[in-house]
Image: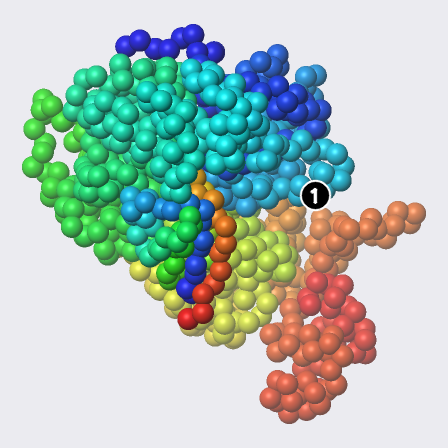
Amino acid sequence: MRYEIRVDGEMTEMLGKAFPELDYVVMSGQTVLFGLVVDEAHLFGLLARCQSLGLRVLEMRQAPE
Amino acid sequence: MAVPDKNGPVPTAPHADPRGDPFPRTQFAMPARPPTFLRRDRLAEHLDEALLTPLTVVGGAAGAGKTMLVADWAAALDGPVAWLTARAADKGCGTFWACLLQALRLAGVAPPIEVDAPAEAGHVDDALLTRLAVELSARDAPVVVVIDEYDRARDPEIADQLESVLRYAGRGMRLVLVTRTEPLLPLHRYRAAGAVTEIRNDELAFTSGEAAALLTLHGLHLPADDVGALVERTRGWAAGLRLSALAAQGEPDPQTYLKEFEADRTTIADFLVAEVLKRQRPETQDLLLRISILERCCPDLANALTERTDAGLILTGLHRENAFVEYLGHAWFRLHPLFGEILRARLRVCAPGLEAELHRRAAHWLRGCGSLDETLGHAAAAGDWECAAGAVVGDLAIGEIFTGLRSDDLSELFSHMGPEPRSPATDLVRAARELARCEVERGLCRLERAAQGLAGKNGPGEDDAPEVAAAQLSRALLEALAARLTGSPARAELAARAAERLRCEVPGRLLDAHPELTALLLTHLGATRLWAGRFGDARAALTTVVDSRRAASTAQAREECLGHLALIDYLQGWPDRAERKARAAVMTGDRRGCPLEPGPGLGYLVLAAVAVDRDELDRAQAFLDAAADASHPMPDPVVQAGRAIVTGRVLLARGETQAALEAVERTVVADVASPWAEAHTASVAAAAHLAEGRPETAAKLLEEEPGHEPLCLVGAAQAELAAGRPGPAVALLDRVRPQGRPGPAVTVRAALVRAQAAGASGDFATQRRLVAQALREARRERLRRPFHEAGPWLRPLLGTVPLSALAEGWLTPGPPSPGCPARPGERSPLPVVEELSGRERDVLRRLAEMMSTEQIAADLCVSVNTVKTHLKSAYRKLAVNRRHDAVHRARELGLL
């Protein structure tokens, strides 16, 4: 499953390292994390990680393969 | 060091955690509020409603100020407050409830003494929760139970359990959940009933006025417009506001600085933490980054990570000046979770590779302080398996791999250990895990290697002498288990003697802290002695465990011991005693949930065996199925043999002789043969041969047995009698008497064989006397099976006076008592009927399903005539003439 998670604010490279399994692009005050998500447990884990890093999740969607 | 004292109340510190760690834990401490804490009246007032509703949920993002809000509110309460911070490491509801009970105890709300702590990480007894709820419901004033970071309590059962306790506790308990995610409790129902107080993220957000007050507390005075812009940028997020205040404090022109921040588009937390961090002195920055790997820290531990000596001053200073280092009392601190998380990400980037080294240092420091859980967590994170295994072994905690609250966690933890580390401790842990999975061969290899590793370290008086002794004692436990799994009594005795010697060499406090070690060792010793047929010695070891002090960690061992004691009673011929103990074993087992010990379901097996003796075959089958349900991939020899024997006896009683023979044919692999297992196996096989009309084969089979087992002697006598040789039969029975004191299950059978022999030689007076004796002995134990097995000669006798009076009510139907209708629910005693054969049963069962004779024939792949023959024979045995009556009667007798 490929997912995209859009969060508020531009992530620094340092914070990007907190998501080593995902790539990210920064665009106009937002950051899109994207990449392969192994399963639902992983997905919820990513959400929890966003939460514990104080990130505001704006959008999350499954990307077409 | 100087400990903050005027920053609100010093949190209460617990004396011990439920798992026996000697540390004060962050888990039960209500965090102290920092001096810059801003009390917001609108929230405090809303929170006051928590005293009116059973449930309160304070939910919001990380850093929204949830914990501090609730801590400030709770500290001002008059009544008792139980505070629990859930931990991610505590998987499973058992651990959760153990902690919550401890929190209640620390709040002075002592749960009743009979509320034992849960014994298993993944299970909690419903009865325990009920008793707790009842206890709470009886309170005059409610206890406020705060569970902070509730989102970490992952086990979905916890929500259900909390809900039920909350419901039954009524006015005695007010639950406050502080959580990042919505709890799984049925909130809609609480909302509909107005039974919940909810404070959500939006309400937690700072208003402009509050933000201005907060900034003033930090020494910043800004115009209203600027404050409004800041609130907009941070969306009123408490952590964001506090961090920006901290960052701006150090600036010559805070106003301009904050304007820049407002224009910046970086993610808020990341940006602000970086800003706050860069304003600290280098030593402080270094310390903050390093302690970010810890869940909590004290100055000494921080010094161990920084390799400096100034941690006490820095931590106290940090706590005084901002909200992100929280004080937990007794010189322990923690970083605000959000702050810690971002620092940890930063540490990975700034100093790659340092994280593992820090975990390793933390593990070593914590090991010296005896905090096993935390040591293990850090050692595993560092991949330092020698340290992790060394901590488990050195702490005498090896038994916890098999039993107790920590066993799941330990298994999970060590499942990540690769094959590389080669210390005796790692080998012992590997051996324990393999033996726990009953991989005996591999376990033995590891154990051997550990023994070799330890052999070189036996010099007394060395510094690590207690460590070595602990390792040797751990090894003795594993040896005893290996002995049990391989059925090797010599090995078990050797291990027990070694353990006895080593007990004096390890610190007494460790033995006290780990009662499960001794209990497991004695269980394995007892089970192995039982296998070897040394019932007296086995009983001694097993009884010690049953009589020992009750502790959650020994519950499983106690249950196993009860099961084994029950088996001994059964084997010695005392079904009533066996049943009582087996019931106790099964009940403790059911309370704990699924058993994972090597002797699972032994209690059920004994119950099945007793049920067969009483001719309650459906019950027997049900118990047997329950024993199989609880089955383990490879149980120990005692259970293997027990299962084969009981299965054989059930099949025998059902008339399925061939299947019974097959059931007992499976050989049990063990180092030494077990006298009782062989005797019972031979006895079942002989009975099967006898039933199929081969008395000579039966006699020969039992002749091969050593011959001192009463059961075999009785069986052999039966065979001799069937072969028409009453003389040798009586001679065999004469040898039964002197052997110990066999119970009724043996003596009743012996008396019946004697009676048959007496009848065969025409001595009917003796026969009647012996039958009367057998009836008297069997009546109390409701031993019906021996009378059914005895043969057709007995039946007419039971109808005569005075024998009929002795048999009435339990063996044969009692006299009709007018005016006293049979009580519903009570099963009428089974009358003596000739057993149906397996095939006859098959036919009857299909008859009961309304199948026609032709359909039955097709279904069983036999001819219609064969079915008719079976039916006729079944009709005769059931004393009926019609299909309908046959089914009805068979149901009545419990044959279907």
**Residue farthest along the right direction in this orientation:** B819
The residue labelled by disc 1 is: B188
Report whether B162 appears left or right of B36.
right
Q: Look at 57% across and 22% down and name the residue there.
A: B209
Give the residue displayed 22% in from the left and 28% down from the top.
Answer: B286
**How many numbered marks, from 0 up?**
1
Residue B407 located left or right of residue B299 = right
x, y percent for residue B677: 39, 56
Placement of B74 over or under B758, stated as above or below: above
Q: How is the image coloured?
A: rainbow
Could you tell me residue B124's position as x and y percent? Answer: 53, 39
Residue drawn at the location 77% of the way across and 68% of the way down: B889
Label 1 element class: helix
Query: How far across and down, in percent of the image, does residue B819 sit?
Result: 92, 47
Residue drawn at 32 percent across, 45 percent down: A12
Residue B564, placed above or below residue B278: below
Picture coordinates of residue B668 (x, y %)?
A: 35, 60
For the question of whether residue B204 can be seen, the reply is yes
Viewer-nearest residue: B607 or B337: B337
Check the residue under mark 1 and report the chain it is in. Answer: B
> Considering the image in quadrants, where does the C terminus of chain B appear?
bottom right
Res B183 → quadrant: top right
Q: Is residue B854 left or right of residue B183?
A: right
- Is B650 on the left-hand or right-hand side of B811? left
Work out which quarter of the rendered image holds the N terminus of chain B and state it: top left
Q: Nearer the viewer, residue B321 or B30?
A: B321
Which of the pair B437/B731 is nearer the observer? B437
B343 or B684, nearer to the observer = B343
The answer to whether residue B33 is visible is no
Other-residue count near label 1 (Cα within 10 Å), few / some / many at <14 / 14–19 / ≥20: few
Q: Amino acid at mark 1?
A: His
